Amino acid sequence: MNIGQGYHLTYCTNIHPGETWAEVFESLKTYVLPIKAHLSPDKPFGIGLRLSDRASKDIITQNYLAEFKFWLQQNGLYIFTMNGFPFGGFHGQVVKDAVHHPDWTTEARLEYTQRLSRILAELLPEGMDGGISTSPLSYKPWLGNDPAHTEEILEQATTHMARLVESLYQLQQETGKTIHIDIEPEPDGLLENAAEFLNYYKSWLLPVTIDYLGTQLGLSADQAEKITKTHIQLCYDVCHFALAYEEPQTVLQQLAEAGIQVGKIQISAALKAQFSGDSEEREEIKQAFQPFVESTYLHQVLVKNADGSIVQYPDLPPALEHIQDAEATEWRTHFHVPIFVDRFNRLQSTQDEIIKTLQLLPDNPVTKHLEVETYTWGVLPGELKQDLGASIERELSWVLAQWPE
């Protein structure tokens, strides 16, 4: 929904199970229509659409796109952002590191993202740009410690990115719609934080894409750089950057200095705990974390030590084995908890990072696309589970309450 000054707020429908188009459409009817009626009865309501690879094929090959577009218009709905990170099944099964598969070294990932781009261009309202978040190229633990292998992965992924930029540029020429793909750094991704994203953009993406567009389309280096920066942007997931202990103002300033745009802000919160030196307290915190140990998603843990160094664990269970490490002063774990809650008994959330990020926007409107992304409702501890529709409304209402006048 348009919340003023051209800002659009929605939630990501990856919260709803559904891998076929029929399942996705049914969930939109079930949940989005009541939410719009309550929060935006007299104005259009935007949707952050998630389509799996299968659903994206369904909607095109079975000619459902025109029907969907008509349904959106009839109900005062619009699509301005999509989630293209999870390729396949995302609920009711073990996801873990499979969320990165297939990665950007594959034709499948490229074709899926191009398909989403064509769908979004068809659905996007006139005068708006559209964004699609995507994975941070690959998953570091798959690569081992072989620099030559990592170099090969980067080369393959960036070649596909260059081809993506070419297709997005051509799509813009054909339709007049600007679609940008928003790379989403996260823990253990090949790109985890601002430094790695910026280094990749400058050292790999720009050189490779400038050369590719020059060869394929005869564009100058300046033209190719401008086109690349238009179509490849950053997805600023607040949870993920909080996990890296990065300050939003610093990250946004670094991006601005590099001339790289933010495609959207995903409003999300991580789970955290702060420690004193007390062993008994640490055991109590361990017990507080136990209900969040579950088998569907990865919950990486980043530990901040007294000397400022960071220790990283690939998931919550192996981290809990080291809960008594006396050097640790704070834990942050990759568990997207409800954003309207800042405490979970002995644990807290990084809700304050959301507030800081939102407060920066009036003076620094880096993006007008805001998307709440809490996808873990199905695996939350029982006492935190509430009616899903009511919970989504509560999250959106909480953001509106924090929104600077």
Image (cartoon, helix red, strand yellow):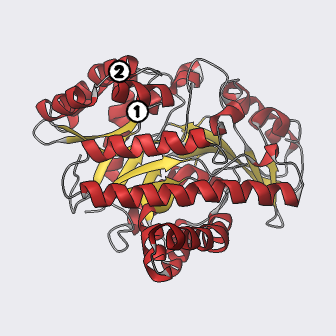
Is residue 74 something that shows in the picture? Answer: yes
In this view, 339 is above or below 204: above
User: Residues at badges 1 and 2 in contact (C-beta under 8 Å)?
Assistant: yes
The x, y position of residue 315, in whole percent, is: 76, 37
Tell me which residue sits at (32%, 33%) in the image. 393
Identify the secondary structure beneath mark 1. helix
- In depth, the one of 98 and 215 nearer the eye is 215
In this view, 84 is above or below 244: above
In this view, 167 is above or below 65: below
Tell me which residue sits at (82%, 48%) in the image. 143
Count of picture labels = 2
Tell me which residue sits at (22%, 40%) in the image. 45
Spatial separation of the CA atoms under disc 1 and disc 2 = 9 Å
Quarter of the image where the N terminus is located: top left
The x, y position of residue 193, in whole percent, is: 65, 61
Q: Splitting the image into 4 quarters, where does residue 24 fall?
A: top left
Tell me which residue sits at (36%, 17%) in the image. 22
The residue under label 2 is: 27
Mark 1, Cα crowd under 10 Å, few <14 / some 14-19 / many 20+, is many
The x, y position of residue 384, in whole percent, is: 52, 25
The amino acid sitting under disc 2 is: Ser
- The answer to whether residue 263 is left or right of residue 327 is left
Is residue 355 something that shows in the picture? Answer: no
In this view, 4 is above or below 321: below
The x, y position of residue 116, in whole percent, is: 41, 41
Quarter of the image where the C terminus is located: bottom left
First in sequence: mark 1 or mark 2?
1
The residue under label 1 is: 13
- In depth, the one of 354 and 26 nearer the eye is 26
- The answer to whether residue 263 is left or right of residue 127 is right
The amino acid sitting under disc 1 is: Thr
